[in-house]
Amino acid sequence: DAGVIQSPRHEVTEMGQEVTLRCKPISGHNSLFWYRQTMMRGLELLIYFNNNVPIDDSGMPEDRFSAKMPNASFSTLKIQPSEPRDSAVYFCASSLTGTGPEKLFFGSGTQLSVL
Amino acid sequence: AQSVTQPDIHITVSEGASLELRCNYSYGATPYLFWYVQSPGQGLQLLLKYFSGDTLVQGIKGFEAEFKRSQSSFNLRKPSVHWSDAAEYFCAVAAHQGGKLIFGQGTELSVKP
């Protein structure tokens, strides 16, 4: 299995632009998580889905952030409009519900820089 | 609410020296506790976990951690550090439902030759 695949690996954009981060979970996994990692706040859970349905989005910082999971093999995290303080590494992770959090698999992350 | 604190942002040790990374958690029930390692440019890899039973757990790459309920701690240790251990280390606590992990801020480990 190729693991959790995130794209792009790096994204550089200008303030005000729309940014879309993509994630392909491991085939068969039905839970998907988006995390953000910054120096100031460490690793934060933004949102997680179970069977394509958002379960907890309390970590989404503000309305500029939105996440979708149109099917079991694809999810997006969108920032519109982007701001310099959104610069961070965004991780996607997936698991099979019921296997416990130890079976969480992380992607390699997307390094976002907003200028 | 659950929370995790890693008091040390950055630690430097000499190769061959012992290592201890601190982690304190706040959680009302018996926690699920984890340590993850993140190498530069890589995602997170699980080092070890504690759910119940023996409070000293062994992980990969020669790491171990000890759960101390009285101190609300889950410190990570390694007897002899290798240069390849240089990375960022995250402690995490999980709720009992699903895979919702709450992470600490992370501790960056540097290894001197």
Image: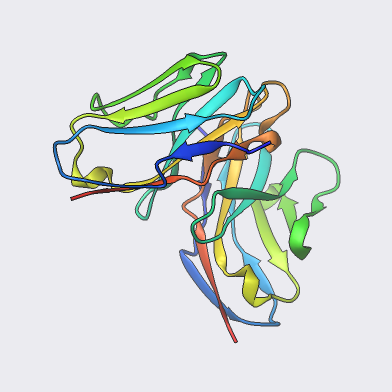
Residue B86, quarter of the rendered image: bottom right
Is residue B64 visible in the rendered image? The answer is no
Q: Is residue A25 above or below residue B49?
A: above
- Residue A69, given in percent of the width and then of the height, sits at 45, 18
Q: Is residue A73 above or below residue B55?
A: above
- Residue A59, given in percent of the width and then of the height, sits at 39, 30
**Left or right of B83 in this view: A74:** left
**Left or right of A40 in this view: B82:** right
Front-most of residues B102 and A83: A83
Residue pictured at 59% horizontal, 61% vertical: B22
Front-most of residues A27 and B5: A27
Front-most of residues A46 and B9: A46
- Residue A19, given in percent of the width and then of the height, sits at 27, 34
Residue pictured at 80% horizontal, 52% vertical: B57
**Left or right of A92 in this view: B36:** right
Judged from this view, the residue extending furthest toward the left is A16
Looking at the rendered image, the quarter that the N terminus of chain A falls into is top right
Residue pictured at 59% horizontal, 44% vertical: B92
Residue A94, quarter of the rendered image: top right
- Residue A104, given in percent of the width and then of the height, sits at 64, 35
Judged from this view, the residue extending furthest toward the bottom is B113
In the rendered picture of this protein, how many numbered marks are placed on residues? 0
Residue pictured at 62% horizontal, 30% vertical: A26
Q: Is residue B67 above or below residue A7?
A: below
Is residue B102 visible in the rendered image? The answer is yes
**Left or right of A111 in this view: B28:** right
